[in-house]
Amino acid sequence: MINPQWLHTFAVLVEKGNFTRTAEAIGITQAAVSQHISRLEDRYGTLFLRRTRQLEITPVGENLLTYVKEVECAQKRLQQKLIHDDTDTGDISLITPGSIGLTLYPLLLELQEAFPRLNVRHRFAPDNEIVASILANEHELGMVTLKPTDPRITSTYFTEEPLELVVPASQKNTEWPDLQKLGFISHPDGEAMATRLLSRKCPDSPSIQEIPYHGFTNQISLILEPVAKGLGFTVIPQYARKAFERQEDIYVVECGSQVVDTIWLIHRAEWPLSLRAQKAIEFLKGKI
């Protein structure tokens, strides 16, 4: 590693153009200035051509000066990140399940519109990937439906999300035989969600495997498209249903007591949240 004092002396000498003025500016002796430059030249080669009353920087010196400026810029950026934590500037990085994410992402864009120096970075992922991303410091904030037990993660209650049985708007009869005739539109969590909810609505009926499958998609924003076209029913989280544009084409079936998932907000426990992340959390809580 290059001695930072030598580099500072070199940069001041470039600016002052004179060993005496450099020594005065730094507060060291002229001999010390000469020693610092000699140490650098021993390592990198000639930095200056010494002419009467004038120093001329060499190409090697120019390259070293570029390096010094890059280091100074890096130090300033680090200082800004470590000390000047701004509520209105920088990344807001969030990773969530698809359903809640469909609601939160537009809200975050609304926040970014109000504060254009914010940079919203959002990703959809399942719970296990969300936890891994938080632990790897890839995202500052995450949301999961299963509260992590890892001591490196802080978990706080954010909201609740009921599961909903959604059928085509034209389908008002929703007993078990009606669902069997209609068919199931599945998704990656479809069977598990349908089993949980339908066991409440139809406790004496067979499992979801007894209902014919009429479609599958892993894109949460598209799950309700075949339902809206009358091709089947599905079970999805409420926020995913609310994000669907054509509400008039679907119908939410009343299933008695709700099946509810808790949404947990998570982040690394070892260090505090940035001010902009705290701002985003309060903004989202006020909107949900």
Image (cartoon, helix red, strand yellow):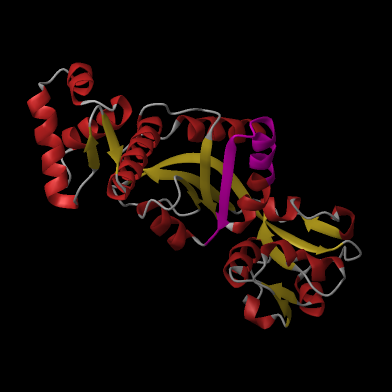
Q: Count the marks.
A: 0
In which image quadrant can residue 133 be found?
Answer: bottom left
x then y, percent, for residue 16: 29, 24
Residue 107 shown in magenta = yes
Quarter of the figure that contains the C terminus: top right
Q: Mark yes or no: residue 206 visible.
A: no
Camera-side residue of 83 and 101:
83
Q: On the rendered structure, is 88 left or right of 186?
A: left
- Identity of the residue drawn at 24% across and 41% down: 49
x then y, percent, for residue 4: 19, 36
Q: On the rendered structure, is 107 left or right of 39?
A: right
- Identity of the residue drawn at 58% across and 44% down: 120
Q: Mark yes or no: residue 75 visible.
A: yes
Query: Please, which residue is most extreme toward the front here?
Result: 52
Camera-side residue of 38 and 232:
38
- Identity of the residue drawn at 58% across and 37% down: 118
Q: Which residues are magenta?
A: 106-125
In which image quadrant can residue 73 be found?
Answer: top left
Would you place residue 108 above or below residue 176 in this image?
Answer: above
In which image quadrant can residue 249 be found?
Answer: bottom right
- Identity of the residue drawn at 71% across and 61% down: 221
x then y, percent, for residue 60: 28, 49
Query: Please, which residue is most extreme toward the right here?
Result: 170
Camera-side residue of 100 and 133:
133
Residue 249 shown in magenta = no
Camera-side residue of 137 and 229:
137
x then y, percent, for residue 46: 20, 47
Would you place residue 200 above or below residue 22 in this image?
Answer: below
